[in-house]
Image (spheres, coloured by chain):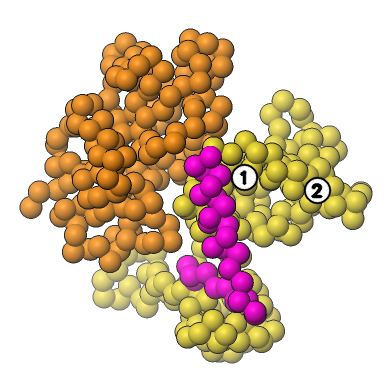
Amino acid sequence: MSEFSVFAVLDDPVRRRLYDYVASQGQGVSRSEAAEAAGIQRTLAAFHLDRLVEAGLLDVAFRRPAGGGGPGAGRPAKLYRRGAAEHQLSVPPRDYRGAAELLAEVVDVTGAEPELHRASRSRGAAAGRAARRQAPHSPDGDLVTGALEAQGYQPYQEGAELRLRNCPFHVLASRYPPLICGMNLALVEGLLEGAAVASLQARMDPRPEECCVAVRDREDSKTNGD
Amino acid sequence: MIRYHLAQLNVGTVRAPIDSPELAEFMAGIEPVNAAADAAPGFVWRLQDGDGPGATALRPRGPDFMVNLSVWESLEALWDFAYRNGPHLDFMRRRREWFHRMTEQHLVLWWVPAGCIPSLEEALARLDLLQREGPSPEAFTFREPHPAPDDEAKESGVTEATGTAQVR
């Protein structure tokens, strides 16, 4: 399927809702869950989910109901999750990823990480300041979540921590982990700084398939009105 | 059939003497990071000298030249520890604070029959080979991995995008 066809599959509001919901979940989503989230019938959801699977936008996994296999164990549940492949389409053709890989290689061989991390921090700070200007009275937590969402991180709350489901620089991060994970950390630190959120701090805490950065309450200062 | 394990040598030249304040955070982090390595899935062995933390007392090519030599069950196991373990990744992120930039390759990987422990001399020879002739099955890097000799049939599982071999 060409990239054009892949994107065409998403050009339907219901399908887009289903995709957004499934893609934002950490684990596999059942048909009824997805239907409920999109506010549509199960059978209609099934139709659209299968179109998304055909396009490779979603993957399917089967899970046996708890209690193990064997005869009489019941039909395995069909679960949907975000497809692993990345899709890019640019008209006219542009290749920013290729450029980014070259630049990353140069930063790596010249040892310019400190400069990269500084630049990333400033970029994060600018995003943080913009978010604060837009919503001066927003609680810290909401403000940070919104600003991280705008950067593509897909934040979600887990216990006391704000985890980031998506690495916006995934391919680069898997080729140059210290470089790009450090860039992510600096960006999130800058964002917190720019948004004047002193109660939270970012730290390196990588997990498979997620961003390597997590945000939590700052240890040395107990809250300031979140 | 013989199983193979992955050996890795990583070298670096420190910016300051190891007992200086500049290196204090690095030196203090070595024991906890090594403990995390020992507990990591797929960890097999690492070189220790019995004198300093880890292998810090071994400086085979001058007082500033530090080595890290270890064996892992697979490329994925090493990659996951190196880049998915928080404290170690943080170490990697900050490496320029403590180590000079290397103009040549500073990490070399090669396969050893399971149960065999490489010597530091052999490891340094592998690094020399990599620097001299570029990546080959005898001395390679994460970016251009070679499958284990017993895994050659599964070569199609090497994913270019991530630079890690994924055996499905």
- Residue situated furthest front in the rendering: B132
In percent of the image, x 28 and y 13: which residue is there?
A: B50
Q: Colour of chain A?
A: yellow
Amino acid type, mark 1: Met
User: Disc 1 designates what residue?
Assistant: A183
Q: Is residue A44 above or below residue A117?
A: below
Q: Which residues are magenta?
A: A82-110
User: Disc 2 designates what residue?
Assistant: A126
Q: Is residue B22 magenta?
A: no
Question: Do pointers 1 and 2 mark residues of a single chain?
Answer: yes
Helix, strand or loop status at disc 2: helix
Q: Is residue A191 visible?
A: no
In percent of the image, x 17 and y 41: which residue is there?
A: B112
x, y percent for residue B58: 31, 17
Q: Colour of chain B?
A: orange
Of residues A38 and A77, the one drawn nearer to the viewer in this rendering: A38
Give neighbour class at mark 2: few <14, some 14-19, many 20+ (Cα, 10 Å): some
Q: Earlier in the sequence, mark 1 or mark 2?
A: 2
Helix, strand or loop status at disc 1: helix
Q: Is residue A107 magenta?
A: yes
